[in-house]
Image (cartoon, rainbow, N blue to C red):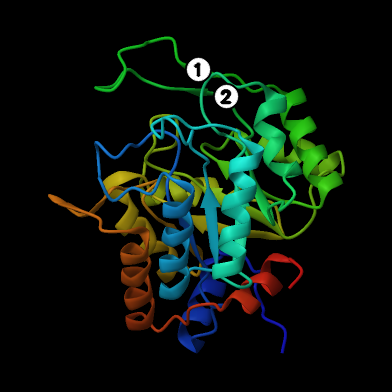
Amino acid sequence: MAIDAIWDYFDPKEWRDRTAASSFPPVMIAVAITGAEASKDMNPNLPVTIEEQIEAAYEAYQAGAISVHIHARNQKDTSKPVPDKDVLNKINEGIRKRCPGMIVNNSTGVGLGYTEKEKLQCLYADSKPDMASLNPCAMMFPPSKASANEENIMPITYGDVRRAATAMKETGVKPEIEIFYNQNWRVVEWLIHQGLLEKPYVVQLVTGSPMSCLPSIQSIFSMGDEAPKGSIIFLPGIGSYQLPANALAIIMGLHVRVGMEDNLHYRRGELAKSSGQLVERVVRIANELNRPVATIAQAREMLGLAE
């Protein structure tokens, strides 16, 4: 039986009716295990080697995650992200062997200082991903304890976004569209008009990062209300906003992203042991809120991905 995965998340009457009938689609749990900026100095449990990332994906898979978002690290200096096709290939292959069917999602964001061509290498790995992130906006990075640099920026043009979307369409990799604030939708609408995006549009509404909308319910509703019809929306939250965002996504009928890329803590003052631990908590919350957790087969059907 086909899953009714596409609906208007922000129509209050439809939400009311679906809540009353417990007819939300199963919640998909995506996991982002590493990221580009965190290091073992921040949390020694962060997976950075090829073997650690495969094991972290397996733990999350066992806990109930349907997809894993990958950032490759330099294996000689694991504090640095790299767009290394060979490293990604080994991670992708390892995950597919240990986690049959799990959706592999490679990052094209990578990190600062890389060319557009380098960032898109992940699409051409021998073990290419099922999905890849598509960023429709430039990003400024504020000074921090790790870096006092006030000039850090990741420039992105319309041409960059078009070329990335074109490469994904040509390689058969499903874009995961990252939305940080409402104006990003103008770029998405342009890509749709160009015929470079196909339904369902898989979207992450990112809140809580320095360049995103405020992590508030009002911001989430404002961003989500502009999503094009045919969108499937995941809701990550950065840092301390992750758990509230997880719970809100389940209640609203959205889908969840969790993991140590976004949050290194399990609770205030307690470091996360693994992304699997964070997935386990989301599964418990979903069960308590009467929302079934999607299987990988169900997720692939909802996202329009081959088995």
Q: Earlier in the sequence, mark 2 or mark 1?
A: 2
Q: Residue 138's mark?
A: 2
- The amino acid type found where label 2 is placed reads Ala
Name above or below for residue 2 compared with residue 69: below
Viewer-proximal residue, 148 or 252? 148
Q: Residue at x 28, y 21 (%)?
A: 144
**Where does the N terminus fall, quadrant-wise?**
bottom right
Viewer-proximal residue, 79 or 63? 79
The quadrant holding residue 250 is: bottom left
Horizontal arrangement in the rendering, residue 61 relative to residue 6 (left or right)? left
Q: Residue 153's mark?
A: 1
Give the alpha-carbon distance from disc 2 to disc 1, as whole Å: 7 Å
Whether label 2 touches label 1, CB < 8 Å:
yes
**Where does the C terminus fall, quadrant-wise?**
bottom right
Whether residue 208 is visible, yes or no, is: yes
Q: Residue 107's spot in the image, x, y percent?
A: 58, 42
Whether residue 177 is visible, yes or no, is: no
Q: Residue furthest front?
A: 76
Viewer-proximal residue, 9 or 142? 142
Horizontal arrangement in the rendering, residue 248 relative to residue 192 (left or right)? left
Q: Residue 275's spot in the image, x, y percent?
A: 36, 59
- The amino acid type found where label 1 is placed reads Ile
Q: Residue at x 26, y 58 (%)?
A: 273
Q: Residue at x 67, y 81 (%)?
A: 3
Q: Secondary structure at mark 2?
A: loop
Horizontal arrangement in the rendering, residue 210 relative to residue 126 (left or right)? left
Q: Residue furthest left?
A: 269
